Amino acid sequence: MSDAEKTDRTEKRVFVKTFGCQMNEYDSFRIIKMLESHGYTRAESYKDADCILLNTCTVRQKAEDKVYSELGRIKKIKRSKPDLIIGVGGCLGQQEGRNLIKKYPYIDLVFGTQSMSRLPDMLAEAAENSATDTRIDYNDSIYPHADYTVAPGQTGSFISIMQGCDNYCAYCIVPYVRGRERSRTPEDILTEIRSLVRSGVKEITLLGQNVNSYGKGLEPGVSFPDLLAAINAVRGLERVRFVTSHPKDLSDDLIACFGDLDKVCEHIHLPLQSGSNEILQKMNRKYSRRDYLKKIDSLRLVKPGISITSDIIVGFPGETEQDFQDTVDIINDIRFTDLFIFHYTDRKGTKAATHPEKIPYDVKIKRLKILNDIQRDISHDINKQHIGRIEHVLFDGVSKKASSLLAGRTRTNIVVNCKGGSADLLGQIHPVKITRANIHSLSGELVVD
Ligand code: SF4
């Protein structure tokens, strides 16, 4: 690279907009850090940017639609600022490739989920040639290690430990856009965690489409419980969480980690998707209702009081009233702390999209509402049980409810808005007496020794 090029790059400001999941948030974080190391600075808005990157999601139709509507907004900005570079990456880039540039000719580059490390070169080429480019491949190395510093006061961080998925659930686009499962080495992950802890991080959340099958293909072999044990030993780290777990891969060894490893928080997100055996089979989930219930029993035996959250899809093709009732029953039986309930939408290229027995939209919305109402009551009931208890809260910011309150999370991942604290407690864990329960949060008062 010539000195002139280096100078040119130092003047570029980039704005990365993220759509969708935590995995994308993490990818955007990595993109920004990587581009900063190539001389880019972070723009605060579209208006200030020389380059706009959309890191997209296609898991649900809604997320995809948001990207298209954002592209409409950006088109207007590009009209008044022709040198603006527009890049679209992530799952939509992977899925649509060059079609995106055909449909939206003002896009300068498209990059896939495994092409992110090539972004500096792609951006430089786009700036010099005004040529459109696409890089869609599965061969890029999985997140190279980087030393990180985080913003002052940041207490938590995500870390991707694996990418891709081998499960091919019938409704899901992820294996097609994220590729086969690939795990980072434990050394690489631990180096990154230590770097984050040195810069003040107390809690990490390990990310992967299917974290429980972490380690596939690594030599020497290492399992997810092995990795958790190594992370648990990192000095200065206080809490470890992980998402997402597939029920079929939730081993006894992993369940035991909740009892054996003091930094592993008492919360698991374990997507159920349906309470009906027939629908689970059609979804290709590879577990039955009974298998799932047994895992819940084991988790609660090892860690009484563990918080269990889940995902449900209503209106999967062929879902009968009885199938739906089976889901209602299992939700009432398990009593999840919280649920993320979605209505089924076709994702192009998946097996379920070709299934002829589609459920009418109004039926799907009715079922969604029924489950939301049931879960709202259960969540509120569970939260009420915390009233009068002392919870250890890691303070991570000012409350959205009132600037006089601090906000943080319990080990079970419930937000607590707390009276009596001050900003110097941010980044620290303190006991809080819970005084009030809401549906999605708790309120409390700092316990002063
Ligand atoms: S486990 Fe199933 S739902 Fe989850 S990412 Fe893989 S294919 Fe998609």
Image (spheres, rainbow, N blue to C red):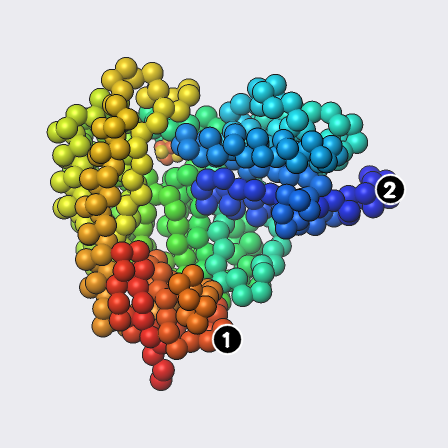
Placement of 184 over or under 425, stated as above or below: above
Q: Position of residue 109 (x, y in %)?
A: 65, 29
Q: Which secondary structure, mark 2?
A: helix
Q: Position of residue 226 (x, y in %)?
A: 40, 51
Q: Which residue occupies the foreground of this view, 223 or 219?
A: 223
Which residue shows up at 68% across the image and 33% down it? Answer: 78
Placement of 325 over or under 7, stated as above or below: above
Crowding at dot 2, Cα within 10 Å, few <14 / some 14-19 / many 20+, comes out as: few
Placement of 323 over or under 225, stated as above or below: above
Placement of 389 over or under 285, stated as above or below: below
Q: Where is residue 2 in the image (x, y as percent from the top left)?
A: 86, 40
Quarter of the figure with residue 267: bottom left
- Ligand 1 shows up in the quarter that is top left
Q: What residue type is labelled 1?
A: Asp
According to the image, label 1 marks what residue? 424
Marks 1 and 2: in contact by CB < 8 Å? no
Q: Where is the N terminus found, in terms of image quarters?
A: top right
Q: Disc number at residue 4? A: 2
Q: What residue type is labelled 2?
A: Ala
